Amino acid sequence: MKPQETHLLEFGPFRIDVGERLLRRGTDVIPLTPKAIETLIILASSGGRVVEKEDLIKRVWPNTFVEEVGLARNISVLRKVLGEGHDDSQYIETIARRGYRFIAPVSEIRGDSAESRSLAVLPLVNLSNNPDEDFFADGMTDELISCLMKVEALHVSSRTSVMTYKGVRRSLRQIARELNVLWVVEGTVLHSEGRVRISARLIDGTTEKHLWTATYEKDMRDVLALQNEVASEIACAIRVKMSIPEQARLAQSRPIIPEAYQDYLRGRYFWNNRTTEGLKRARDYFQKAIENDPTYAPAHSGLADAYAVLGSTGYDVMPPAEAMPLAKAAAMKALQIDDGLAEAHAALGYVKLVYDWDWAGAERELLRAIELNPGYATAHQWQGELLMGLSRSAEATEAFRRALELDPLSIPCNLGLGWSHYFSRNYDLAIEQHRRTLEIAPNVPMALYGLGLAYHHKKRPEQGISELKRALKFFEGEPAAVMLMSVTHAISGKREAAVRDLERLQQLSQQRYVPAVYSAFVYIVLNDLDNAFEWLNKACAERSSYLIFLNAQPSLDKLRSDPRYLDLLKRVGLKLDAPSRRLSN
């Protein structure tokens, strides 16, 4: 008989063995009734969400009538064994007239090993008197997070999540609970006169007890060794077992030209902003870094990322034929220098996907990136896009969910999951996810656009048009705004206005790059299929990144029986029976 997979839930000093239905504190087993332990497992597994009383009763006592007093008795017993008083809720919070929420950070461990650990590296504080050095402190935070993410047994909160706590006064216990981690790393960084000093502290997220403190200082040329040393010490302090390849990766370092490294950090700072101007500045800083040190692989990888996004539909800064070959060349140069660089494999995989339409090659590169750095959310996001394009809906959704586990506040990852539901025709889930994205960032046009389309396909045109109009406010004259206005008019039955917008879109293309696929979108809504195919063919000629979704986009359903559609699929490397395709062993 195959042994049962280990499934543990850790919080504070406690550990639940889900399979054995046992609660332990250290080596001691705490006796609980079956219903009490079941109640605790449900609450601890809820991911910090409120569990309604009625739902909790149904799950603990299925097919049985039980009054609320039975549940209250279980909660009282659990609070007692967990050491909580009436006014001290470290673990179970009562939500008046609704239910209960487990508020302590929980680490879920599956598999034969019990080595999984969760932590967050809070933004390092800049001790320099120069505010312009903030980018350096943020960059050092990013790099330390990246080092730790290479350890598979560690679950490390993403940069996006931790940066929301920059300059925020909040207890470490509350931060750990909000980030759902067991440990918090906080510290300072000082960059002065060619030297770098990092002071770091590891803190228990439940008790706020300091577990480990250390200070490291090196010459700026040895900053990579410094980062690896700090990451290794943190992993050792929380008793994480690293594989031999992981140990080797953290042991590797090389001297770096300080000016190149600082330009690289500036480039990553602006790339993370994901604005049009930010991406342009990121490209320029990465190029400066390469000029200062042509052998620094991450700078080439950063340049690949910048060009890849600049040439993608939605940003519309550069035609794909200009941007994507530059992105590919930069990624390949990075890998020529360091074949173990996950970010470069991911960038190359993205270009192979959206520009080369080399589906098998793209999947190989993205899987390699994930193998090298399982915590790199962008690789999972781009893998989700590949799987969406192949209509492997369930796998795509899982990839986006994994990306969100790693980077819950990432706008691209949140958008990806919303569009994944939309492409799968799960319009209710698409609406729910796009609304969740808008809770994080209320003015994201692509979330409003996706929300509008989902309502449109749900046969709720008034709500759809309302959301599309909201999206218009935030594009500010961009080609996507003109396209969106034209689509809104077309959906509203205002054909003449839609055509006028189309003419404006084509005039705009005389001044700047406008994706041909935008005109195709409008003609499809107008049921002008001849013109729709003409513009789709133009989009194919310019190798629009959006065409990877030809098989998935619901708006294209009306085209699928046309031979011209099948020809388009063939050119993009797809088949009509895409759901059955499997590229991986």
Image: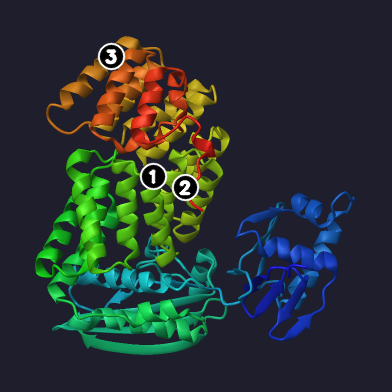
Image quadrant of residue 223?
bottom left
Residue occupying image coordinates x 69% and y 68% = 5
Q: Is residue 447 above or below residue 402?
A: above
What residue does disc 3 label? 499
Residues at marks 1 and 2 touching, judged by CB atoms closer than 8 Å: yes
Dot 2 falls on a residue whose secondary structure is loop
Dot 1 falls on a residue whose secondary structure is helix
Q: Foreground residue, 232 or 435?
A: 232
Query: Where's residue 180, x and y in %?
Result: 54, 66
Query: Where's residue 222, x and y in %?
Result: 22, 83
Q: Can residue 16 be seen in this view?
A: yes
Furthest-left residue in view?
291
Q: Relative to 490, is 325 on the left or the right?
A: left
Q: Relative to 309, is 462 on the left or the right?
A: right
Q: Relative to 396, is 521 on the left or the right?
A: left
The residue mark sitting in front, 2 or 3, is 2
- Earlier in the chain: of badge 1 and badge 2, it is 1
Furthest-top residue in view?
496
Query: Where's residue 364, x and y in %?
Result: 40, 54
Residue occupying image coordinates x 50% and y 45% = 582
Residue occupying image coordinates x 68% and y 76% = 15
What residue does disc 1 label? 359
Dot 3 falls on a residue whose secondary structure is helix
Q: How many marks?
A: 3
Measure how far apart labels 3 and 1 are at the Cα level.
36 Å
- Crowd band around label 1 with a 10 angstrom C-alpha radius: few (<14), some (14–19), many (20+): many
Specify the amino acid type for callout 2. Answer: Leu
- Crowd band around label 2 with a 10 angstrom C-alpha radius: few (<14), some (14–19), many (20+): few
